[in-house]
Image: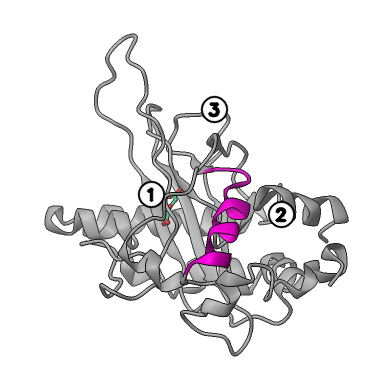
Amino acid sequence: MLSDQHKRQIIDEGYVQLPGVIPPERVNAARRVINASLGANGLPPDKLPIYAAQSYCPELRETDAIAGLFRDTPVITLAESLLGPVNVPAAGQVALRFPRATINPGEEPPPVRGHIDGIATPTNGVKPGTLASFTMLAGVLLSDLPDEYAGNFTVFPGSHDRFGAWFRDHDPIEMAGGMPPVEHGQPRQVTGKAGDVVFAHYLTCHGIAANLSPNIRYAIFFRVNPKGRHGYRPEAIRDMWLDWVGLHPLLGR
Ligand SMILES: O=C(O)CCC(=O)C(=O)O
Protein backbone atom coordinates (compact mmCIF):
# COMPACT_ATOMS: atom_id res chain seq x y z
CA MET A 1 0.00 0.00 0.00
CA LEU A 2 1.09 3.55 -0.54
CA SER A 3 1.92 5.40 2.65
CA ASP A 4 1.19 9.08 3.18
CA GLN A 5 4.94 9.61 2.79
CA HIS A 6 4.84 8.05 -0.70
CA LYS A 7 1.88 10.21 -1.60
CA ARG A 8 3.65 13.30 -0.25
CA GLN A 9 6.64 12.53 -2.44
CA ILE A 10 4.41 12.50 -5.51
CA ILE A 11 2.92 15.84 -4.50
CA ASP A 12 6.29 17.43 -3.69
CA GLU A 13 8.61 15.83 -6.25
CA GLY A 14 6.23 14.60 -8.96
CA TYR A 15 7.20 10.93 -8.67
CA VAL A 16 7.69 8.04 -6.28
CA GLN A 17 9.69 4.82 -6.49
CA LEU A 18 8.27 1.69 -4.85
CA PRO A 19 10.74 -1.16 -4.29
CA GLY A 20 9.98 -4.82 -4.95
CA VAL A 21 6.42 -4.51 -6.25
CA ILE A 22 6.78 -7.08 -9.05
CA PRO A 23 7.62 -10.67 -8.07
CA PRO A 24 10.87 -12.05 -9.53
CA GLU A 25 9.00 -14.71 -11.58
CA ARG A 26 7.14 -11.99 -13.45
CA VAL A 27 10.32 -9.96 -14.00
CA ASN A 28 11.96 -13.08 -15.42
CA ALA A 29 8.95 -13.97 -17.59
CA ALA A 30 9.00 -10.47 -19.12
CA ARG A 31 12.75 -10.55 -19.74
CA ARG A 32 12.47 -14.05 -21.19
CA VAL A 33 9.93 -13.05 -23.86
CA ILE A 34 11.87 -9.88 -24.70
CA ASN A 35 15.17 -11.74 -25.07
CA ALA A 36 13.46 -14.52 -27.05
CA SER A 37 11.97 -11.90 -29.38
CA LEU A 38 15.35 -10.22 -29.88
CA GLY A 39 16.90 -13.61 -30.65
CA ALA A 40 14.14 -14.70 -33.01
CA ASN A 41 13.27 -11.48 -34.79
CA GLY A 42 16.33 -9.30 -34.30
CA LEU A 43 15.99 -5.55 -34.58
CA PRO A 44 15.22 -4.24 -38.07
CA PRO A 45 17.68 -1.34 -38.53
CA ASP A 46 15.11 0.82 -40.35
CA LYS A 47 12.73 0.50 -37.38
CA LEU A 48 15.24 1.39 -34.65
CA PRO A 49 14.27 5.08 -34.28
CA ILE A 50 10.57 4.13 -34.02
CA TYR A 51 11.26 1.31 -31.57
CA ALA A 52 13.37 3.64 -29.40
CA ALA A 53 10.59 6.24 -29.30
CA GLN A 54 7.54 3.93 -29.15
CA SER A 55 8.37 0.35 -28.15
CA TYR A 56 10.75 -2.44 -28.90
CA CYS A 57 9.26 -5.89 -29.57
CA PRO A 58 5.89 -4.44 -30.64
CA GLU A 59 4.37 -7.93 -30.97
CA LEU A 60 4.78 -8.37 -27.19
CA ARG A 61 3.14 -5.18 -26.02
CA GLU A 62 -0.29 -6.69 -25.31
CA THR A 63 0.85 -10.09 -24.03
CA ASP A 64 0.31 -11.35 -20.50
CA ALA A 65 4.06 -11.19 -19.88
CA ILE A 66 4.16 -7.45 -20.65
CA ALA A 67 0.67 -5.93 -20.26
CA GLY A 68 0.11 -8.27 -17.30
CA LEU A 69 2.81 -6.41 -15.35
CA PHE A 70 0.17 -3.74 -14.74
CA ARG A 71 -3.14 -5.59 -14.62
CA ASP A 72 -2.08 -8.83 -12.89
CA THR A 73 0.24 -7.48 -10.21
CA PRO A 74 -0.09 -5.07 -7.25
CA VAL A 75 0.63 -2.21 -9.69
CA ILE A 76 -3.05 -1.82 -10.54
CA THR A 77 -4.12 -1.52 -6.88
CA LEU A 78 -1.33 0.94 -6.17
CA ALA A 79 -2.27 3.02 -9.21
CA GLU A 80 -5.93 2.98 -8.21
CA SER A 81 -5.05 4.19 -4.72
CA LEU A 82 -3.82 7.36 -6.48
CA LEU A 83 -6.28 7.81 -9.34
CA GLY A 84 -9.35 5.79 -8.33
CA PRO A 85 -10.50 3.16 -10.86
CA VAL A 86 -8.36 3.28 -14.02
CA ASN A 87 -8.62 2.25 -17.65
CA VAL A 88 -6.45 -0.87 -17.58
CA PRO A 89 -3.68 -0.24 -20.13
CA ALA A 90 -3.99 -2.76 -22.97
CA ALA A 91 -0.29 -2.52 -23.78
CA GLY A 92 3.05 -1.71 -22.25
CA GLN A 93 5.97 0.11 -23.87
CA VAL A 94 8.99 -2.18 -24.05
CA ALA A 95 11.71 0.36 -23.29
CA LEU A 96 15.20 -0.99 -23.87
CA ARG A 97 18.20 1.32 -23.63
CA PHE A 98 21.33 -0.03 -25.24
CA PRO A 99 24.92 0.61 -24.16
CA ARG A 100 27.29 2.59 -26.30
CA ALA A 101 29.90 0.44 -28.02
CA THR A 102 32.84 2.55 -26.93
CA ILE A 103 33.56 4.77 -23.97
CA ASN A 104 36.44 7.19 -24.16
CA PRO A 105 38.47 7.36 -20.94
CA GLY A 106 37.70 10.49 -18.98
CA GLU A 107 34.73 11.36 -21.20
CA GLU A 108 31.96 13.32 -19.47
CA PRO A 109 28.58 11.65 -19.98
CA PRO A 110 26.15 13.89 -21.87
CA PRO A 111 23.52 15.73 -19.79
CA VAL A 112 20.08 14.11 -19.61
CA ARG A 113 17.59 15.89 -21.86
CA GLY A 114 14.15 16.24 -20.29
CA HIS A 115 10.77 16.09 -21.99
CA ILE A 116 7.08 15.77 -21.27
CA ASP A 117 5.37 12.98 -23.19
CA GLY A 118 2.81 13.42 -25.91
CA ILE A 119 4.44 16.12 -28.04
CA ALA A 120 4.72 15.00 -31.67
CA THR A 121 8.15 14.04 -32.97
CA PRO A 122 8.98 12.37 -36.30
CA THR A 123 9.19 8.98 -34.55
CA ASN A 124 6.77 8.84 -31.61
CA GLY A 125 3.51 8.31 -33.52
CA VAL A 126 1.77 11.40 -32.09
CA LYS A 127 -0.21 13.38 -34.69
CA PRO A 128 1.35 16.84 -35.18
CA GLY A 129 -0.73 19.59 -33.62
CA THR A 130 -2.20 17.28 -30.97
CA LEU A 131 -1.04 16.61 -27.42
CA ALA A 132 -1.20 12.96 -26.33
CA SER A 133 -1.50 13.73 -22.63
CA PHE A 134 -2.40 11.29 -19.87
CA THR A 135 -2.49 11.28 -16.08
CA MET A 136 0.30 9.08 -14.73
CA LEU A 137 3.36 7.33 -16.11
CA ALA A 138 3.98 3.94 -14.48
CA GLY A 139 7.38 2.37 -15.03
CA VAL A 140 8.42 -1.17 -14.11
CA LEU A 141 12.17 -1.80 -13.84
CA LEU A 142 13.18 -5.15 -15.30
CA SER A 143 16.91 -4.57 -14.72
CA ASP A 144 18.89 -4.01 -11.55
CA LEU A 145 20.27 -0.49 -11.81
CA PRO A 146 22.77 -0.01 -8.99
CA ASP A 147 24.53 2.84 -10.76
CA GLU A 148 23.82 5.98 -12.72
CA TYR A 149 24.55 6.31 -16.46
CA ALA A 150 23.22 2.85 -17.17
CA GLY A 151 20.30 4.02 -19.33
CA ASN A 152 18.41 5.03 -16.17
CA PHE A 153 14.94 6.53 -16.29
CA THR A 154 15.60 10.05 -15.05
CA VAL A 155 13.20 12.50 -13.44
CA PHE A 156 13.46 16.21 -12.79
CA PRO A 157 11.97 16.42 -9.29
CA GLY A 158 9.69 19.42 -8.78
CA SER A 159 9.37 20.14 -12.51
CA HIS A 160 5.70 19.07 -12.36
CA ASP A 161 4.95 22.08 -10.13
CA ARG A 162 6.70 24.51 -12.46
CA PHE A 163 4.90 23.15 -15.53
CA GLY A 164 1.63 23.12 -13.56
CA ALA A 165 2.14 26.80 -12.72
CA TRP A 166 2.88 27.59 -16.37
CA PHE A 167 -0.37 25.99 -17.51
CA ARG A 168 -2.44 28.01 -15.10
CA ASP A 169 -1.77 30.94 -17.48
CA HIS A 170 -1.34 29.14 -20.82
CA ASP A 171 -3.52 26.99 -23.01
CA PRO A 172 -2.23 23.40 -22.66
CA ILE A 173 -2.52 22.85 -26.42
CA GLU A 174 0.39 25.29 -26.83
CA MET A 175 2.62 22.41 -25.69
CA ALA A 176 1.71 20.52 -28.90
CA GLY A 177 4.15 22.95 -30.55
CA GLY A 178 7.06 22.07 -28.26
CA MET A 179 8.26 22.16 -24.67
CA PRO A 180 7.31 25.39 -22.88
CA PRO A 181 10.17 27.56 -21.59
CA VAL A 182 10.00 26.20 -18.04
CA GLU A 183 13.05 25.42 -15.89
CA HIS A 184 13.51 21.64 -15.64
CA GLY A 185 15.71 21.74 -12.53
CA GLN A 186 18.27 19.11 -11.57
CA PRO A 187 17.92 15.59 -12.99
CA ARG A 188 17.77 12.56 -10.70
CA GLN A 189 18.62 9.20 -12.23
CA VAL A 190 16.49 6.39 -10.86
CA THR A 191 18.63 3.56 -9.53
CA GLY A 192 17.13 0.45 -7.97
CA LYS A 193 16.30 -3.16 -8.59
CA ALA A 194 14.34 -5.19 -11.08
CA GLY A 195 10.77 -5.30 -9.77
CA ASP A 196 10.73 -1.69 -8.57
CA VAL A 197 7.92 0.51 -9.85
CA VAL A 198 7.98 4.26 -10.46
CA PHE A 199 4.87 6.42 -10.69
CA ALA A 200 5.24 9.93 -12.12
CA HIS A 201 2.83 12.77 -12.77
CA TYR A 202 2.23 13.50 -16.46
CA LEU A 203 3.81 16.94 -16.00
CA THR A 204 7.00 15.58 -14.44
CA CYS A 205 9.75 16.24 -16.93
CA HIS A 206 11.81 13.09 -17.51
CA GLY A 207 14.41 11.59 -19.80
CA ILE A 208 16.91 8.82 -20.29
CA ALA A 209 20.50 8.82 -19.00
CA ALA A 210 23.24 7.70 -21.37
CA ASN A 211 24.04 4.02 -21.02
CA LEU A 212 27.76 3.74 -20.34
CA SER A 213 27.30 0.33 -18.66
CA PRO A 214 27.93 -2.93 -20.51
CA ASN A 215 24.26 -3.99 -20.14
CA ILE A 216 20.93 -3.40 -21.86
CA ARG A 217 18.50 -1.53 -19.60
CA TYR A 218 15.07 -3.21 -19.58
CA ALA A 219 11.89 -1.44 -18.43
CA ILE A 220 8.20 -1.34 -19.27
CA PHE A 221 6.14 1.86 -19.20
CA PHE A 222 2.38 2.31 -19.00
CA ARG A 223 0.42 5.50 -19.54
CA VAL A 224 -2.51 5.55 -17.17
CA ASN A 225 -5.80 7.44 -17.00
CA PRO A 226 -8.78 7.25 -14.65
CA LYS A 227 -11.64 5.07 -15.87
CA GLY A 228 -13.64 6.67 -18.65
CA ARG A 229 -11.02 9.36 -19.33
CA HIS A 230 -9.16 9.09 -22.61
CA GLY A 231 -6.64 11.26 -24.39
CA TYR A 232 -6.13 15.01 -24.18
CA ARG A 233 -7.80 16.55 -21.15
CA PRO A 234 -6.80 20.23 -20.85
CA GLU A 235 -8.71 20.74 -17.60
CA ALA A 236 -6.53 18.08 -15.92
CA ILE A 237 -3.39 19.90 -17.10
CA ARG A 238 -4.58 23.33 -15.96
CA ASP A 239 -5.62 21.80 -12.63
CA MET A 240 -2.81 19.28 -12.30
CA TRP A 241 -4.21 17.23 -9.38
CA LEU A 242 -7.81 17.13 -10.63
CA ASP A 243 -7.69 13.43 -11.53
CA TRP A 244 -5.48 12.32 -8.61
CA VAL A 245 -8.40 11.68 -6.29
CA GLY A 246 -6.29 9.53 -3.95
CA LEU A 247 -4.19 12.60 -3.14
CA HIS A 248 -7.11 14.96 -2.58
CA PRO A 249 -7.30 14.43 1.21
CA LEU A 250 -3.58 15.28 1.55
CA LEU A 251 -4.07 18.29 -0.72
CA GLY A 252 -7.01 19.46 1.41
CA ARG A 253 -9.48 19.12 -1.50
O1 LIG B 1 13.18 4.60 -21.15
C1 LIG B 1 13.10 5.45 -20.28
O2 LIG B 1 13.72 5.38 -19.21
C2 LIG B 1 12.20 6.65 -20.44
C3 LIG B 1 11.34 6.59 -21.64
C4 LIG B 1 10.68 7.90 -21.90
O3 LIG B 1 11.14 8.94 -21.51
C5 LIG B 1 9.45 7.95 -22.60
O4 LIG B 1 9.07 6.94 -23.21
O5 LIG B 1 8.80 9.01 -22.58
The C terminus lies in which quarter of the figure? Answer: bottom right
Q: Residue at x 54, y 34 (%)?
A: 186
The residues bearing labels 3 and 1 have C-alpha atoms spaced at a distance of 17 Å
Lateral position of residue 97 relative to residue 9, left or right = left
Type of amino acid at the residue the image marks with label 1: Leu
**Is residue 232 depicted above or below 176 in this figure?**
below
Q: Which label was assigned to residue 147?
A: 3
Of 119 and 4, the residue lying toward us: 119
Sequence-first disc among 3 and 2: 2
Instruction: Kindly report the distance in space between the C-alpha atoms of the residues bearing marks 1 and 2.
Output: 25 Å
What amino acid type should be assigned to the residue bearing mark 2? Ile
In the shown orientation, is residue 88 left or right of residue 129? right
Q: Is residue 230 above or below residue 210?
A: below
x 57%, y 48%: residue: 159
Q: Which residues are magenta?
A: 155-170
Q: Would you say 67 lies left or right of 55 here?
A: right
> Element under label 2?
helix
Residue 63 at x, y = what percent? 45, 74
Q: Nearer the viewer, mark 3 or mark 2?
A: 2
Image spot of residue 250 (x, y percent):
86, 63
Residue 134 rendering spot, x and y as whole percentages: 52, 72
Q: Which residue is mark 1?
A: 96
Q: CA distance from mark 3 to mark 2?
A: 23 Å
- Mark 2, residue position: 10
Task: Evaluate whether residue 58 shows in this view.
Answer: yes
